């Protein structure tokens, strides 16, 4: 029997109200999701802004680089400048680049150009190049200059011929470099400014053609030119063995990795420009065959002069003798020539006392 007209209308009205309430509920849920997304995005933006502010407040000679105040900022969006997996050399035009990912072994297209990279990541090329390169390499700069701020150099495809960044006429501020053969390399006449560099580890290959004795892998390597500045870095000279290494590493370290070459090496190569006006100050060094190596490869008749400000040395370093203690936190290699550097402010990181000459007390001449 049909319902009375009045009851039918009442039911329809209730159903309409229920539908309206359901729609409002759905709209409220959608609005809540949007608000949550907006809140999360705002929190992320605030975290990025806070990280940038903290980095801007770093104090030279006081604050040391670390994982949280260097490299690309976690959560900050980046876009691909070119395609992932790019093989070979890649020329980059002068200009300003913000929060972009670069693939391939990149270099300046114009030797006289000005380059600024902020918050960028350099992934490097694929496989082994035919010779030494970097995720970014700038040997070819003549009057130009490249500046890197808050960037990360980390090869997706490690190679014994691929460093993080190498060359000259560049400034690297608050940058990270890891996974390459060397972290930051300087080997041109124009010098480099490296401030707040952070290197936690590098990649080792037994078949490395450059150093058959296994002493490659330097977080910072200066081999020619100037002026050079390395300051306020946190440089750990440890390595991980590459998946494609032809053999094992025989220098195990207590942290589960292996000892590398030198946390900082200043090596006056015979074939490169004379090293001059080089200052090393405010750094925390650890691991390695040595932590600071000054090597006068030109030998007789040449003076390698380096200005050393206060630097700190971790106790963990490779022992070069199985029968006794032969540790080289600071390793001086005059090769018949001379090395001048003030050792007064070279101190242990744990108690602040000074390093002194000796096989187990800090400064070793070989």
Image (cartoon, grey):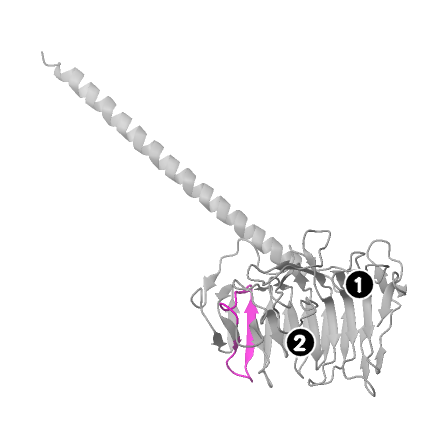
In terms of secondary structure, where does tag 1 sit? Answer: loop
Estimate the x, y position of residue 90 in percent, counting from the top left: 48, 75
Q: CA distance from mark 2 to mark 1?
A: 27 Å
Q: Is mark 2 in CB contact (under 8 Å) with mark 1?
A: no
Residues in magenta, as a range: 107-128
Badge 2 density bin: few <14, some 14–19, many ≥20, Cα 10 Å: many
Looking at the rendered structure, the number of numbered marks drawn on it comes to 2
Q: Is residue 309 visible?
A: no
In terms of secondary structure, where does tag 2 sit? Answer: strand
Q: Looking at this view, is 163 or 353 the one in front?
A: 163
Estimate the x, y position of residue 232 in percent, counting from the top left: 73, 64
Q: Which mark is residue 20?
A: none
* Magenta stretch holds residue 266: no
Q: Is residue 348 left or right of residue 213?
A: right
Q: Is residue 292 visible?
A: yes
Q: Dot 1 corresponds to which residue?
A: 320
Estimate the x, y position of residue 141 in percent, counting from the top left: 58, 82
For the view shown, which residue lies furthest in the bottom direction? 301
Q: Is residue 172 left or right of residue 346?
A: left
Q: Dot 2 corresponds to which residue?
A: 186
Q: Looking at this view, is 280 or 325 the one in front?
A: 325
Quarter containing the N terminus: top left
Q: Looking at this view, is 28 or 212 the one in front?
A: 212
Asked where in the image residue 252 lies, by quadrant, the reply is: bottom right
Above or below 262: residue 271: below
Badge 1 density bin: few <14, some 14–19, many ≥20, Cα 10 Å: some
For the view shown, which residue lies furthest in the top direction? 1
Q: Residue at x 79, y 74 (%)?
A: 294
Q: Looking at this view, is 264 or 335 the one in front?
A: 335
């Amino acid at each position: 029997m049909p319902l009375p007209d009045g009851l039918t209308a009442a039911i329809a009205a209730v159903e309409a109200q229920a539908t309206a309430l359901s729609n409002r509920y759905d709209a409220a849920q959608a609005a809540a999701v949007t608000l949550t997304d907006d809140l999360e995005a705002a929190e992320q933006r605030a975290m990025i802004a806070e990280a940038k502010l903290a980095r801007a407040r770093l104090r030279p000679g006081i604050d040391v680089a670390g994982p949280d105040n260097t490299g690309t900022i976690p959560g900050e969006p980046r876009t691909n400048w070119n395609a992932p997996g790019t093989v070979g050399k890649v020329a980059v035009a002068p200009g300003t680049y913000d929060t972009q990912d670069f693939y391939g072994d990149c270099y300046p297209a114009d030797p006289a150009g000005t380059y600024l990279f902020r918050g960028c990541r350099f992934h490097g090329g694929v496989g082994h190049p035919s010779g030494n390169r970097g995720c970014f390499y700038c040997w070819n700069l003549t009057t130009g200059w490249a500046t890197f701020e808050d960037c990360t150099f980390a090869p997706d495809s490690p190679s014994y011929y691929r460093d993080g960044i190498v060359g000259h006429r560049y400034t690297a501020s608050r940058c990270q470099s890891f996974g390459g053969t060397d972290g930051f390399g300087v080997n041109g006449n124009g010098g480099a400014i490296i401030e707040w560099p952070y290197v936690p580890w590098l990649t080792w290959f037994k078949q490395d053609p450059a150093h058959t004795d296994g002493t490659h892998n330097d977080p910072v390597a200066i081999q020619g030119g100037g002026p050079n500045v390395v300051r306020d870095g946190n440089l750990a000279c440890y390595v991980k063995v590459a998946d494609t290494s032809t053999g094992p590493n025989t220098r195990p370290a207590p942290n589960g990795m292996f000892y590398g070459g030198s946390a900082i090496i200043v090596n006056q190569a015979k074939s490169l420009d004379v090293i001059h006006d080089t200052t090393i100050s405010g750094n925390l060094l650890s691991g390695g065959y040595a932590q600071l190596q000054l090597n006068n490869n030109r030998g007789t008749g040449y003076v390698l002069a380096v200005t050393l400000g206060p630097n700190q040395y971790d106790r963990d370093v490779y022992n070069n003798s199985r029968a006794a203690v032969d540790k080289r936190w600071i390793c001086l290699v005059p090769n018949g020539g001379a090395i001048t550097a003030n050792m007064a402010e070279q101190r242990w990181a744990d108690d602040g006392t000074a390093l002194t000459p000796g096989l187990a007390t800090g400064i070793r001449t070989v």
